[in-house]
Amino acid sequence: MKLLVLTADANTLVYHRGDLIRDFAAHGCEVVTAAAEDYPHVREFVGKLGGRHRAIRMARSKINPLKDLVTLCDMWRLFRSEKPDALFAYTIKSVVYGCVIARLAGIRRVYALLPGLGFTFVKPVTWKQKIVSFISEALHRFALKRADVIFMQNHDDVTLFTGMNMLPQGVPVHVTAGSGVNIEEFGHAPLENDADIAAGRIRFVLVSRLLISKGVRVFAEAARRIKQLQPHAEFHLVGPFDPNPNRVDESEVRQWVAEGTLTHYGMVRDVAPLLKTMHVFVLPTWYREGVPHATLEALATGRPVITTNSVGARECVKLTAEGETQRENGEMLMQGENGFLCQPQNIAAVECAMEWYLANPAQIAAQGQGSRQLAADVFDVRLVNEIIIRAMRLQKAVRGEFAVHSSLALPHSSF
């Protein structure tokens, strides 16, 4: 079976879907990948699995009729030349355009995965946003009718699409726990007996593209406030600048670094070793996530998590009974077994959660254990991939465990 995996972002083929692609190959698929970039490391990774990578012209964001027409033509040529038996498409444009063109090109099986809805289905305010929202809804509704199976990454998105009548009748919908995390490659690094924690030098880290909606400014402002009273606390920002209109400007980050608020690392290809030097992971996002991959990596390494009570993000903290009550009462901070949920865009809530760890350093290791357990029980990539493999009815080509245990190791990145 020849399977074409289509996405807008080539890096995700390795860093987010590498384990899944390895499982596709282990189940006898000839894998061809396609994305908007032709990176050497992607070609190398896919090539080692016996597949090929091809580049097509596709912008990740914004609707531009002329550029999107080029994308449609490239997809048509790609599908007609490769003649795959099935298409596995993820990211918005790959799904809304790919599903339709695949049917026109005669591809027999079409699988659509919606990893996160971002701003696409946020309630529009301006007329421009309303127009874009209308077009996006129409494209999704039309495209998903061409899919044989739909995968979504959290139940909130399923509820939203069901309420909007976006899910076609008769098409199976499967919910995966995000894209999963390889709990062996992101091994547990216990925090018991950590000398820096005992000395009060708690290190907080945010790993993300530098977008306002990912909570980068919230993180920086909470860090600034805490630094004034707790100068030994450390704050680390990991992630690349982004061309998105929602981006954080480079000048802002330079200012935070210059004033001593935080340390910025930029793009880090292998983020696992860096995560293991940190103590508490923070992602104050209000972006409509699938399930944030960086947070999954933090769970796997055994880091307590401070994130928000927003779509996708809330999946990563298991609330205590008290925390559930706090959420029901609409409080700004909700206690979890492995961290805290905060009200979105609430700097004071993030600050309070950070202060709790500074005042209760002995709890960091125990909550880190809770994060690791959550990763193993819910987000293990083997569990996630098994849902997809079974829904696609692929037959395993080799005996043994899933190919996630292959000697072909993946580099680590959350972007």
Image (tube, grey):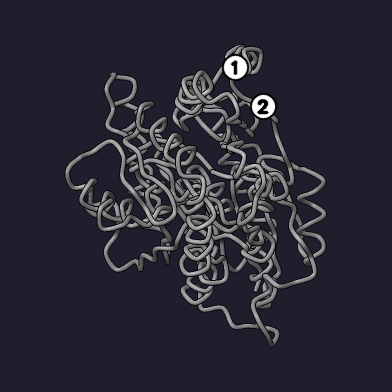
Amino acid type, mark 1: Trp
- Residue 204, compared with residue 125, is above or below; it is below
- Residue 406, compared with residue 297, is above or below; it is below
Crowding at mark 1 (Cα within 10 Å: few <14, some 14-19, many 20+): some
Report how far apart the C-alphas of labels 1 and 2 lie in the structure.
Answer: 9 Å
Residue 402 lies, in percent from the top left, at 64, 77
Residue name at image x 57 percent, y 28 percent: 210
Residue projecting furthest to the left: 329
Is residue 137 left or right of 38 when viewed as pictured? left
- Residue 313, compared with residue 254, is above or below; it is below
Residue 168 lies, in percent from the top left, at 29, 59
Using the image as rendered, state which of residue 330 and residue 400 is in the foreground. Answer: 330
Using the image as rendered, state which of residue 74 and residue 48 is in the foreground. Answer: 48
Using the image as rendered, state which of residue 133 and residue 117 is in the foreground. Answer: 117
Quarter holding the N terminus is bottom right
Quarter holding the C terminus is top right
Residue name at image x 48 percent, y 72 percent: 387
N-terminal of the two: label 1 or label 2?
1
Examine the image and state in which quarter residue 135 appears.
top left
Amino acid type, mark 2: His
Mark 1 lies on a secondary structure that is helix
Examine the image and state in which quarter residue 147 appears.
bottom left
Pointers 1 and 2 in contact (C-beta within 8 Å): yes
Is residue 371 left or right of 38 when viewed as pictured? left
Tag of residue 256:
1
Is residue 270 left or right of 234 when viewed as pictured? right
Asked whether residue 178 appears in the rendered view, the answer is yes
Residue identified by numbered label 2: 264
Examine the image and state in which quarter residue 207 appears.
top right
Residue 301 lies, in percent from the top left, at 61, 56
Residue 396 lies, in percent from the top left, at 63, 83
Residue name at image x 27 percent, y 22 percent: 125
